[in-house]
Amino acid sequence: MAISSVGTAILSLAMTACVMDSIQQSHVVGNVPPATEFHRVLQRDLDAYFATALVPSRHVQYEMLREGATQSGVSYPKFYVWAIFPLTAGDRRGAVRLAAIDRERFEVTDFISDDEIKRHPDRIYETFPRPVCERIKAKVGIK
């Protein structure tokens, strides 16, 4: 029985998708810190990023806005957190996008404060996936 040209195209697309999934998974495995080190590394790198704003010896508190990595193409895997960090004049909070790199570190690629989100709520859709945006809006009380 011969496969039609439509069947061949569907099979080709399925194989391409499988290869892309495999490549994307390899980027996650190759860049995300091991589970036993994940939160320690994330805490260290959030503290380092916000260090100039932090009250001495305080840590950034964070909550994952999405469990697991978001992998798009062959870029570094992304993670999304809601961060709260202490300042001398009170706490500051906001949404953070981080890239996992070489299983050793996270790099903050974007931070949008809750004040900025309240002023320009549509801006978060330029940086964060839609489901994450809905969680962010709930954090700042936007419907």
Image (cartoon, grey):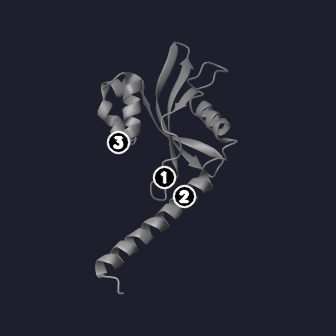
Q: Which residue is mark 3?
A: 126
The secondary structure type at the circle numbered 3 is helix
Q: Which residue is mark 1?
A: 71
Dot label at residue 96? none
Q: Is the C terminus in the top left, top right, bottom left or bottom right quadrant?
A: top left
Labels 3 and 2 touching (C-beta < 8 A): no
Labels 1 and 2 touching (C-beta < 8 A): yes
Q: How many marks?
A: 3
Q: Residue at x 35, y 72 (%)?
A: 10
* Extreme residue toward the right, this view: 36
Q: Position of residue 65 (x, y in %)?
A: 48, 35
Q: Residues within 10 Å of mark 2 (few under 14, many from 20)?
A: some
Residue 5 drawn above or below residue 93:
below
Q: Residue at x 65, y 39 (%)?
A: 41
- For this rendering, which residue is in front, 49 or 6? 6
The earlier-in-sequence mark between 1 and 2 is: 2
Select label 3 or label 2 by which is in front: 2
Q: Amino acid at mark 2?
A: Gln
Q: Amino acid at mark 1?
A: Gln
Q: Position of residue 17 (x, y in %)?
A: 43, 65
Q: Residue at x 30, y 29 (%)?
A: 120
Q: Residues within 10 Å of mark 1 (few under 14, many from 20)?
A: some
- For this rendering, which residue is in front, 135 or 116? 135
Name the image quarter holding residue 9: bottom left
Q: Alpha carbon of mark 1 to alpha carbon of mark 2: how far?
A: 8 Å
Dot label at residue 25? 2
- For this rendering, which residue is in front, 56 or 121? 121
Q: Position of residue 61 (x, y in %)?
A: 58, 25
Q: Position of residue 111 (x, y in %)?
A: 46, 34
